[in-house]
């Protein structure tokens, strides 16, 4: 599959100190807010707005949407996502400059199915934005792009990723790779360093605010929170974005 590039305008990847705006997930707070019918973050309402492409959802709402999904019955991160496999296979045949209408329509169908299992997958949202744009549906293109942008910002807001004590928090292993690929960072095989944190080394260290960064830390604890008995550890295959850029909105 050709490399797909994601763009987040105005963002610097995980600075050298935990940013002032960082919002480390507070599980008690999240659970209380998303289960309270009187709360503006009551989960059924949030998800309804998200799936409808509501552009008025705030950064705060995305925080509860993303991390609140870990408490939903649909959150089964260790199960296979056949629709995602189909989507990636379809995307591998794309002629980015001259896409076929039929293929774009198939991507949308597969994308919608894949999002039932993983509604916040940046890779899927990027492909959806591309397909909608190619079919001339600019409203849905923008909605998918904004969803992708907010999901990645939510993950980045959760920590600076520079130490095991300040990791970014993810719901799926692939989401970590999505964030790093946003900045066109190439990675080595991830290393599990504790029951909750993985370390993803960079192929080439980068300088961030005058300091050399060799890799980033991600908290993956939610993925194994309800691990089925007898489950054998298996990492998702890696992927890279490349050349497929969603439309930028200001």
Image (cartoon, helix red, strand yellow):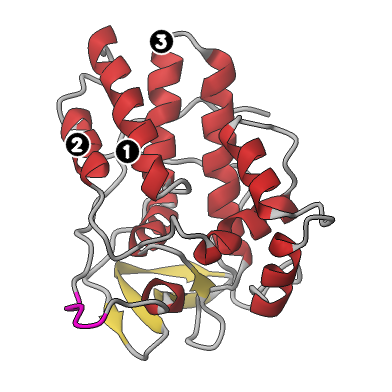
Quick one: SS at disc 3?
A: loop
SS majority, magenta: loop
Residue toward you, 12 or 234: 234
Report crowding for label 1: few under 14, some 14 to 19, many 20 or more residues within 10 A (C-alpha). Answer: many
What is the magenta range? 229-233
Q: Name the residue tied to disc 1.
A: 4
Q: Position of residue 144 (x, y in %)?
A: 52, 31
Quick one: SS at disc 1?
A: loop
Report crowding for label 3: few under 14, some 14 to 19, many 20 or more residues within 10 A (C-alpha). Answer: some
* Badge 3 or badge 2: first in the primary sequence: 2
Task: Give the foreground label among 1 and 2.
Answer: 2
The C terminus lies in quadrant: top right
Quick one: SS at disc 2?
A: helix
Q: Name the residue tied to disc 3.
A: 135
Task: Give the foreground label among 3 and 2.
Answer: 2
| Residue appearing at x 37%, y 51% in the figure | 184
Q: Name the residue tied to disc 2.
A: 86
| Residue appearing at x 22%, y 30% in the figure | 91
Left or right: 38 in relation to 73: right
Task: Give the foreground label among 1 and 3.
Answer: 3
Which mark identifies residue 217? none
* Badge 1 or badge 3: first in the primary sequence: 1
Q: Gap in Å between the C-alphas at discs 3 and 2?
A: 20 Å
Left or right: 67 in relation to 58: left
Q: Can residue 81 be seen? A: yes
Report crowding for label 2: few under 14, some 14 to 19, many 20 or more residues within 10 A (C-alpha). Answer: some
């Amino acid at each position: 599959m050709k490399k797909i590039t994601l763009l987040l305008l105005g963002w610097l990847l995980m600075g050298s100190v935990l940013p002032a705006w960082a919002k480390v997930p507070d599980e008690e707070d999240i659970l209380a807010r998303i289960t309270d019918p009187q709360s503006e973050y009551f989960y059924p309402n949030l998800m309804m707005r998200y799936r409808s492409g509501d552009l008025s959802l705030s950064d705060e709402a995305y925080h509860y949407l993303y991390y609140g999904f870990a408490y939903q019955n649909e959150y089964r991160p260790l199960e296979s996502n056949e629709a995602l496999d189909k989507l990636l296979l379809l995307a591998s045949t794309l002629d980015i400059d001259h896409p076929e209408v039929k293929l774009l329509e198939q991507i949308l169908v597969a994308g919608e199915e894949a999002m039932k299992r993983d509604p916040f997958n940046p890779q899927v949202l990027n492909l959806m934005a591309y397909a909608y744009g190619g079919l001339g549906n600019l409203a849905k293109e923008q909605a998918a792009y904004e969803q992708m942008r907010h999901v990645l910002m939510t993950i980045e807001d959760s920590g600076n990723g520079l130490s095991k004590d300040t990791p970014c928090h993810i719901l799926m292993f692939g989401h970590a790779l999505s964030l790093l690929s946003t900045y066109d960072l190439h990675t080595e095989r991830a290393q599990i360093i504790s029951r909750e944190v993985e370390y993803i080394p960079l192929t080439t260290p980068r300088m961030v605010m005058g300091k050399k960064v060799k890799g980033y830390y991600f908290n993956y604890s939610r993925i194994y929170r309800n691990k089925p008995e007898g489950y054998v550890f298996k990492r998702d295959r890696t992927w890279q974005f490349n050349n497929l850029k969603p439309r930028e909105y200001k």
